[in-house]
Amino acid sequence: MAQMTKSIPGVEIKNLDGKTINTAAFENEGKPMVIDFWATWCSPCKAELNAIAENYADWQKETGVKIIAVSIDDARNMEKVKPYVQGKNWEYEVYLDPNGDFKRAMNVNNVPHLFVINGKREIVYQQNSAAPGDDEKLYEIVKKVAAGEALK
Amino acid sequence: MKRSNKLQILFMAILLSHFCEAQQSPGGELHGNTQTDIQYYRNDSLIGAPVVPEKFRMNHFTNLIFEKGNFTAGIRYEAYYNALLGFDQRYNGNGIPFRFARYRNEQFEFTAGNFYEQFGSGLILRAYEERGLGYDNCFDGALVKFIGIKGLEIKGLVGKQRVFFEKGAGIVRGFDGELNLNTLMPSRKDKINNLVLGGSFVSKYQLDQNSTFRLPENVGAFAGRARANFKNISVSGEYVYKVNDPSTVNKYIYKPGEALLLNVAYTVKGFGFNLGMKRIDNMNFRSDRDAQLNNLLINFLPALTRQHTYNLAATLYPYATQPNGETGLQADVITTFQKGSLLGGQYGTTLLINYSNAYGIVADKITGSDSLEGYRSHYFKIPRDIYFQDLNIEINKKLTKKLKMVLMYANFVFNGSVITGVTLRSEMVHAHVGVADLTYKFNSKHALRTEFQVLFTEQDRGNWAAILAEYTISPKWFFAFLNQYNFGNEDPKKRLHYPMLNIGYTHEATRVSLGYGRQRAGIFCVGGVCRQVPASNGLSISVTTSF
């Protein structure tokens, strides 16, 4: 079966100040984006996002990539997301998807699950696990996508 | 049943015809995911594993979503042949319990069929799915959203809720509105940089067929909420009031219900503080007054306690919300000591402290002519019946370029008879948990993570130890070995080992994992909802993919 193109569906989610945002508005001026689903209770998710955070400034400088971290924490943990993000000095765009609307629209089974989006806002890569070293592999992909190279 | 089958066939036909079209025209998109969990069970009376006559069981889910322009439609097929141990066996069978069609323009969104929805924090209404728990209280009906004005959202819904492959008896009607004053009035120049106000009304209808009581057929609930950010401080809260709603869970009392959730957070770069408080009083809210367990819940009452991830801390003594009455608070502090500082060292250090507790509410039983009310509760009296307490401290530190360390200590007080409803050997369990988690990265592909865990308690089943070794080859493989050992059990025959071997393979959005060994009985929780998982021994396979 031919690979069908897949774009970002439009769903209402919240930013960390409680403001409603539509995901169809995710934008990075033709540069790559990474949408990473995570939760405060997901250790591998946090380990990967923390590993990326160490090099995020370099990634941005070299490729212009934007990382969008979507927390699927519900009412139990959602208020802890902002303190965690600030406490960890993350520079990502962070959103809350407390009832899983965006998660379902993106067909995510479980976290961690990340999507790499090219400059035309098409999903070109997905990864449904996080192990030490995956951040380096992700950056290889982001560099290729930024340069407009094919992944395969 | 017949009618819904016809509907399902119609939906399938629409989807399939569009699917064929989508292959040719680039205008439509079809995507989805699947999950299959199978388990082969071996007999193991030593650990108390129930005998499984089928030997082999399976849970399966497939979602398909079709999108074209403003139109979205989807279905979910589920099959349980038979439902895995620990899941309600009323799921056994198969069907399409979820199908929907949605149209959206710039002003409105219309959904017909099944949908999930949450008003505010979910305290008054939340329909959601948690497959791992066998939890799905989705609506079947109609949902309309008005999204035409930025900063204003209005939603209205009517529907019945899913219970296994059927629908509950009651009809739920709900309205919700939310205003973001700063978006609506961008010229507002005060110091509050985001002010959000919201309100909801939810009502359920269920016929009264009870011969002894005159039961309310319509039960209404109201909620108000607010969130404000002021410089580095954010404050939010929600309050719900529900009129009399006698049910099996509240033992048919006519007292109104209430719930309150408050939160204050202070955050600056490198530091976060959060304080949450809640009070719940007779707030069990279901679309069938006789439903129990996790069935047909209209609202969601979160447990305000830390959701632990380390095995012994997560599954032996976790808290579950008590909908009939509880008060609790939780505080979190997280701070990162920057690299180069005394405590930060070469790579920085993160310290997390979390404290939470839960108590019963102070209530006086009412007798005499008003006894239908059940009890009178007091807001400001300090409660004494402790249900739960958890104090935990965690340190995250990168020691060298290759070695990372997490140290965690947790101290639990767990009221077993209240939380699990099962009398443990001792009503109150006091437990200490210590964890050391070390990750060594050999190179950009290979890493070894080890966990050493201990749990000390003089009650229940006594002391435990656990050891985990997890070897990963990025980005495809993981191999893990876990052994839990109940070395402190009073009964020497029950000082058992629970070894488990896991192998996982990931290719992009496809994950396959295999597990073989003994699974300890425990409580598996996501959010505020928990499921008792019985002990088992055998081989499990899980395959998930997204496309």
Image (tube, grey):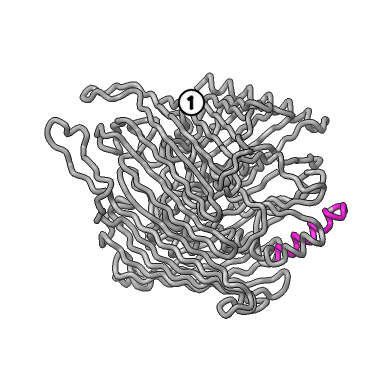
Dot 1 amino acid type: Gly
Count neighbours of disc 1 (C-alpha within 10 A) and say few if under 14, some if 14 to 19, many if 20 or more.
many
Looking at the image, can residue B439 be seen? no
Task: Give the vertical position of A64 relative to B168 (above or below).
Answer: below
How many numbered markers are drawn? 1
For residue B403, side relative to residue A40 (left or right): right
Q: Which residue appears at 39% of the width and 69% of the height?
A: B496
For the residue pair B505 and B448, the one nearer the viewer reads as: B448
Looking at the image, can residue B394 be seen? yes
For the residue pair B46 and A137, the one nearer the viewer reads as: A137
| Rendered location of residue B118, percent (x, y) | 51, 37
**Chain ID at mark 1:** B
Span of residues in magenta:
A133-150
| Rendered location of residue A51, percent (x, y) | 66, 65
Secondary element at image label 1: strand
| Rendered location of residue A39, percent (x, y) | 56, 54
**Residue indicated by mark 1:** B159
- Please tell me in which quadrant of the rendered image residue B5 appears: top right
For residue B78, side relative to residue B213 (left or right): right
| Rendered location of residue B293, percent (x, y) | 37, 41
For residue B466, side relative to residue B329 (left or right): right
For the residue pair A136 and B211, the one nearer the viewer reads as: A136
Q: Residue furthest left?
A: B368
Would you say residue A135 sits in the magenta stretch? Answer: yes
